[in-house]
Amino acid sequence: MSKKNNKKKIIIVIFILFIIAIITAFIIYLNNRIVDDNSGFTLKDDLTSEIYVETNIEDYINTIEGKILEKPKINNKQLGKQKIEFIYLNKDNRKRRGTFEIEIVDTEKPLVWLSNNYNTQKGKSIDLEKNIMCVDNYDNKPTCKIEGTYDINTPGTYNLTYKAIDSSNNTFEKAFTLTVYEPVTNQNTNKTNTSSESQEPKYTDFKEVLNNYKTENNEIGIDVSKWQGDIDFKKVKDAGASFVMIRVGSQKGTKGEYVIDPYFKQNIENAIENDLKVGVYFYSYADSEKEAKKQANWIIKEIKDYEISLPIVFDFESFDAFNEMELSIFGLNEIANTFIETVDKAGYKGVLYGSKNYLNAIWKYHTAPVWLAHYTDKTNYEGEYFMWQMCDDGKIDGINGYVDIDILYKNSSEN
């Protein structure tokens, strides 16, 4: 056989192999290509989800013949319709793309901090709409208004209605009364008072707290600021306290400057010198995530030279200014989360401070450990907390005046 014929055969073989390879690749492609196919699964009747409630693909699938391979991230922070695409393996073991649409909705009414009755003196300047806290979980500025008429200059009782509506048309409505009264002049200024004014003020003794609450799974301590003045931390330590939370500083109102507590330096140095564990807190008016991050970094700079063994605390109690901030409840929670995440990234432990009522009503979307404030003998707060501020009328050796007393838990099973 000539070389020419051999070469021809080789070319033919190569061509055949090439064709086989193309056919094989095409078959593989046909078998593995992802085509749109909604026939392999069924959906639940309800394809809605509440805003800020985390969901996943399985929450909407009723039945599926195979299994889900790729799950999309569902955006639960934006209202409206959302297209969902996912990859699944059907009963023939072939990849398919399923698609459907969900809707993120808001069915929660605005939150209005409203009493049944308000009293004000005749002629006194009052702005009820400003003083009554009205916020929404989603809207930065829900529509909040008082329906009815009243006259601050005319004594009497006025029946009014407070109404709040958000962008999803969720409506809060409640009747309340405003009483305008004449100022009363006290004619008995020289009368001797023999009632409660002559009695010794009530207080919570730190020694009694130790006796009643101390266990092997907790520690008892205090939290302090400039309001406690000069503190003898040796006496505090000898009295049985094992830790102290110290205010590092505060913000001068919304968008205000940061001010270091005038007693911070001496408090933290003297506490550490007397072998007390220390943590710090900052009284914040943060109205943006940017502001919260800035505050956290400011605190980190102020404490860098000290051994901080307990958390750094985000203390937001500025709810009288909440309306003016035009923040949603979720937005405020994100501010707290940003502060705490910044602290955590710096190697510290960030936590959230809050009273029982505000933890239940406002701090619903935070992700941090909680320092609970609830002034009672036994708290009925049902959430998780690592520390409990049980009173603000404590008395302990080393401090002239009242001080907050706290219980720090070594594990969450005891609280």
Image: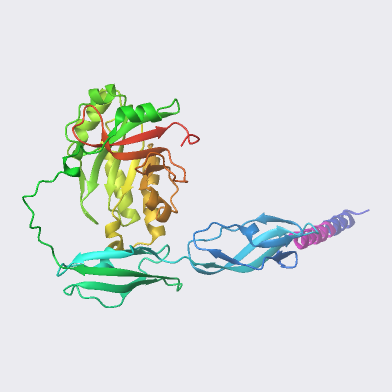
Can I make out residue 143 in this image? yes
- Specify start and end residues of the magenta stretch as a single range: 15-32
Q: Where residue 387 appears, x then y in whole percent?
A: 39, 37
Q: Is residue 245 above or below residue 100?
A: above
Q: Quadrant of residue 350?
A: top left
Q: Where residue 105 appears, x then y in whole percent?
A: 52, 68
Q: Nearer the viewer, residue 35 or 260?
A: 260
Residue visible at 28% across and 41% down? 299
Total numbered labels placed on residues in the image: 0
The answer to if 17 sits in the magenta stretch is: yes
Q: Nearer the viewer, residue 190 or 29?
A: 190
Q: Is residue 45 left or right of residue 82?
A: right
Q: Is residue 133 left or right of residue 218?
A: left
Q: Where residue 179 appears, x then y in whole percent?
A: 24, 68
Can I make out residue 307 in this image? no
The answer to if 298 sits in the magenta stretch is: no
Magenta stretch prevailing secondary structure: helix
Residue visible at 27% across and 69% down? 178
Q: Is residue 145 left or right of residue 123?
A: right
Residue visible at 41% across and 52% down? 363
Q: Quadrant of residue 160?
A: bottom left
